[in-house]
Amino acid sequence: MANKMLKRTGLPLGLCERLWKYQIINCRDFLSLSSLELMRHMGQSINKVYELTKIVSKACAPKMITALEMKNERCSCPSSAFFPTSLADLDEVLHGGLACGTLTEVTGPSGCGKTQFCIMLSVLATLPIGMGGLDGTVIYIDTESAFSAERLVEIARCRFPDYFCTDLELISMTNKIHLYRELTCSDVLRRVESLEDDVISKGVKLIVVDSVASVIRKEFDTQLQGNLSERSNLLLSEAAMLKYLAEEFSIPVILTNQITTRIGQRRAANFRPDSVVDNLSSSEGCGVSPDGETGYATAALGNTWSHSVNTRLIMQYLDYHSRQIIVAKSPLAPFAMFNFTIQDSGLILQGEDDRSSSQREGTDPGLQPIRVRSSISHSSGRDLLVQSQAKP
């Protein structure tokens, strides 16, 4: 709440513009200054400064709400509580879709469908509410230069052929998706910190960051002293601002993450928390070694980041054509697995979900093993999958 812009606190607009010149933009900037500093910047008396400080403090202070009030609020407007993914079985498990006002992370190996999922959700967010959309615009922060406008149009045409039957509807949809390409950690953080104005002025109903891990892992070598702490602080700052935007405007925020390798107990001393899984078909990939030691792929960025997201969806390879999406962490939904394929229209679920007790017993969303594609057999045309489970 301290990140709330001053012009949304009830202060006179002229006064906010004057403070802006001194880089006093949000509630934190304002309340960090002494009364004398505020008097000098605003040209107001001490009594007036006290009065304005109370206004700002009240605007950014978290308001108490009872569980009953929260329940009644969601029941009175259920359509704004969840964002349907158009994957019916997944939405059913998630009680209606991705929860608005929260952070949802999608993690998995490269090429598994994370960006495809984000592009599909971007199309859905622009649709009218009557069609299961959010009737709004989208902010898409692309850190990997993976976003494809051609793929966006293809998914729209193939998934909703009746609605996007003319170029006019397609042009309107593409104009509602605002793409930012940020390739460094500082650029991403600055962009996130400046999003509040965009959310208000552009009528944003969905924020996508694809991906969080990309820039972090390029800039921070966790083997260097102090880098791990600095990286954690940066991730926490990004998560805090994104949570504020999600909660303040009741919109879903989608984040993609990469994977990393974890080694079993015997090699734990040599394990680095952010080792990159670049080639899982190599001898250093995930699998079971001759001496029975285990290694496995799991979500990157460590426990600090894992605790920052509200929902974690994991995508993993199943075979040559099929993949799985796993509900690994959710405040509402049980552990569940769904098979899917990627087609011209985006993600298509195949068959029923698997929520057997054997799958969910002892499942730690921070250590959930992820199946990866290690190599492709030219003779059979199938993927060789390697997966092992963490030792207790």
Image (cartoon, rainbow, N blue to C red):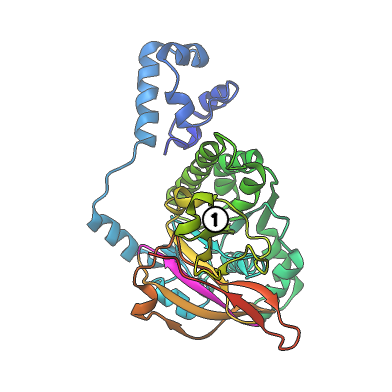
188, 138: nearer the viewer = 188
348, 373: nearer the viewer = 373
| 323 part of magenta stretch | yes
Q: Residue at x 73, y 65 (%)?
A: 171
Q: Is residue 64 left or right of residue 38?
A: left
Position of residue 24 relative to residue 247, above or below, is above
Q: Residue at x 69, y 70 (%)?
A: 169
> Can residue 32 be seen by looking at this rendering?
yes
Region rendered in magenta: 321-331
Task: Identify the image quadrant of the N terminus.
Answer: top left
Q: How many marks?
A: 1
Write down the quadrant of residue 121 in the picture: bottom right
Q: Is residue 132 left or right of residue 162?
A: left
Q: Position of residue 359 (x, y in %)?
A: 39, 76
**Main SS, magenta residues:** strand
Report helix, strand or loop for mark 1: loop
Q: Position of residue 305 (x, y in %)?
A: 48, 50
Position of residue 308 relative to residue 29, above or below, is below
Q: Position of residue 78 (x, y in %)?
A: 38, 67
Task: Identify the image quadrant of the C terminus.
Answer: bottom left
The residue under label 1 is: 300
Type of residue at label 1?
Answer: Ala
Farthest residue in the front direction?
Answer: 291
Binning the other alpha carbons within 10 Å of mark 1 as few (below 14), some (14 to 19) or many (20 upward) gives: many
Q: Position of residue 376 (x, y in %)?
A: 71, 78
Q: Is residue 74 left or right of residue 37?
A: left
Q: Residue at x 56, y 39 (%)?
A: 193
| 174 part of magenta stretch | no
> Can residue 160 be seen by looking at this rendering?
no
